Each structure stands twice: as structure tokens, then as C-alpha cells.
Image: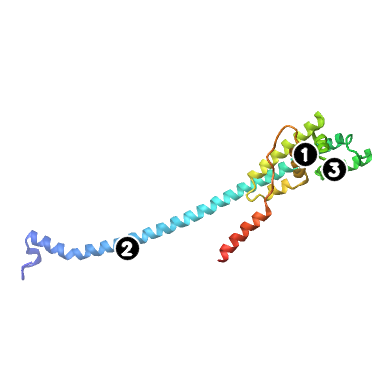
């Protein structure tokens, strides 16, 4: 801009150059301010997104826990009815077995008392009695005991099927095998293992509970790693 020439009297091109120079710093300043504002907004959005993701993860975990709890409650209701059903099957099988046991036959009064215990909620009483028979019967006699007649075989097969169903249901709602293990090592579970072992025509895969030694070894390895 020429010295002593009023701003308003400048030619258009010089006026434009003057304004461009005058406002260049302001434009740069607004650009910097805009970048800071944008970064701040992005940071806030990222933090909000992180909180939303955290809340979403917690909600997902809560929903999964609620669903698992609902499945477990449903399982325990079904399991109680199944335990009673399996107990009734073993009761009928036990009555049929009285004709082949060499000793320890029960009178009608004794059997009535046992059925009363069953009716009061001890649904595994007959299973325990079968397990006690192993001390006096050899393998062939146990096979005859469970599968020696068509009626006994039908009772034993029904027991195996019923137990297998409840075991599969348990695995669907059991994250750490606590429920499954408790079923397998119950009186019904141990009797089921014997029936599968002595079945005359089906070779069943073995049923095993959690190996305590392997479990403790894994626990010890994790504990050692954390301490290290």
C-alpha cells in the first residue's frame, strides 16, 4: 500500500492484497483453534464410545449370567423330577432282583419301610442298595441282576436313557462341571456307570468326573505364573 494514500482510495487489487495479509494470521489462528476443538471433540467421542462399549459389555455379561441362572433353575426343577423317576425305576428293578440274590432278601414289611423312605424324598435309596450288592455278587451275577430278564433289561435301559438325558441337560448349564460332577458321583450316577459297564450289547464310552489331580496341577501352574 502506497504511503499516505487512504485505505479507501486504494485500487481494488491492492486493497485485496492488504486484506489478504491482514486476515491471514486470523485465518491461521482459526484453523489452529478449529483443530484443537476437533481433537477435543474426538477425544470426548472416543471416551463416550469407550464408556458405551464398557456398559454394553457389562450388559452382555449380565444378560448371559441371567440366562445361565434361568437355565440352571429350570435344570434343577427337571433334575428333581428325573431323580424321582430314576428312583422309581431302581425300586421296580430291586423288587425283581429279589428272586436272584443269594442272601439278604427283604420281607414285605422291610420293603414297605424302604418305599416309605423313597416317598419321603430319598430317591436314591435303591441305587445305594444295588451298589452295596457289589460286595456279594460277582460280575456275571451283576449282569444277570440288571439284564437277566426282559423286564430287568427294560428297567435298566430306561434308567440309562433317563440318566443320560439329565446329564446332557446338566452340561448345557454347567460352566465349571460342578453340577455334572455331582450327578456322576451320586448314587444314581455310580449305578448308571455299573449298568453301562455290564450292558450285554452296547459298548458305552466311559463317564468320568473332573480329575482332581489334573485340576490342582492346572491351578498350581496358574498360581505359580501369577506369583512370578
| Quarter of the figure that contains the N terminus | bottom left
The numbered mark, 1 or 2, whose residue comes first in the sequence reads: 2
The numbered mark, 3 or 1, whose residue comes first in the sequence reads: 1
Classed neighbour count for the residue bearing mark 2: other residues with Cα under 10 Å, few (<14), some (14–19), many (≥20): few
Q: Are marks 1 and 2 in contact (CB under 8 Å)?
A: no
Classed neighbour count for the residue bearing mark 1: other residues with Cα under 10 Å, few (<14), some (14–19), many (≥20): many
The residue pinned by badge 2 equals 36
The residue pinned by badge 3 equals 133
Distance in Å between CA atoms under marks 3 and 2: 84 Å
- Tell us which disc is closer to us: 3 or 2: 3
Where's residue 147, x and y in %? 79, 33
| Quarter of the figure that contains the C terminus | bottom right
Front one among 212 and 76: 212
Q: Is residue 183 left or right of residue 128?
A: left
The residue pinned by badge 1 equals 86
For residue 97, which quarter of the picture? top right
Amino acid at each position: 500500500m502506497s504511503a499516505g494514500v487512504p485505505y479507501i482510495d486504494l485500487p481494488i487489487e491492492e486493497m485485496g492484497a492488504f486484506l489478504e495479509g491482514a486476515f491471514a494470521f486470523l485465518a491461521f489462528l482459526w484453523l489452529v483453534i478449529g483443530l484443537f476443538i476437533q481433537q477435543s471433540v474426538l477425544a470426548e467421542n472416543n471416551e463416550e464410545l469407550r464408556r458405551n462399549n464398557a456398559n454394553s459389555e457389562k450388559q452382555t455379561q449380565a444378560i448371559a449370567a441371567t440366562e445361565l441362572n434361568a437355565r440352571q433353575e429350570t435344570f434343577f426343577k427337571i433334575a428333581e423330577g428325573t431323580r424321582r423317576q430314576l428312583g422309581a425305576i431302581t425300586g421296580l428293578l430291586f423288587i425283581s432282583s429279589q428272586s436272584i440274590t443269594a442272601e439278604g432278601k427283604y420281607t414285605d414289611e422291610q420293603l414297605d419301610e424302604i418305599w416309605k423312605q423313597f416317598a419321603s424324598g430319598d430317591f436314591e435309596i435303591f441305587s445305594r442298595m444295588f451298589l452295596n450288592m457289589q460286595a456279594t455278587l460277582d460280575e456275571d451275577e451283576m449282569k444277570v441282576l440288571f439284564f437277566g430278564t426282559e423286564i430287568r433289561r427294560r428297567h435298566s435301559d430306561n434308567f440309562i436313557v433317563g440318566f443320560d438325558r439329565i446329564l446332557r441337560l446338566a452340561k448345557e448349564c454347567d460352566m465349571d462341571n460342578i453340577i455334572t460332577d455331582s450327578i456322576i458321583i451320586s448314587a444314581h450316577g455310580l449305578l448308571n456307570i455299573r449298568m453301562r459297564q455290564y450292558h450285554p450289547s452296547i459298548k458305552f464310552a466311559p463317564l468320568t468326573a473332573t480329575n482332581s489331580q489334573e485340576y490342582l496341577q492346572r491351578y498350581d501352574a496358574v498360581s505359580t505364573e501369577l506369583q512370578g
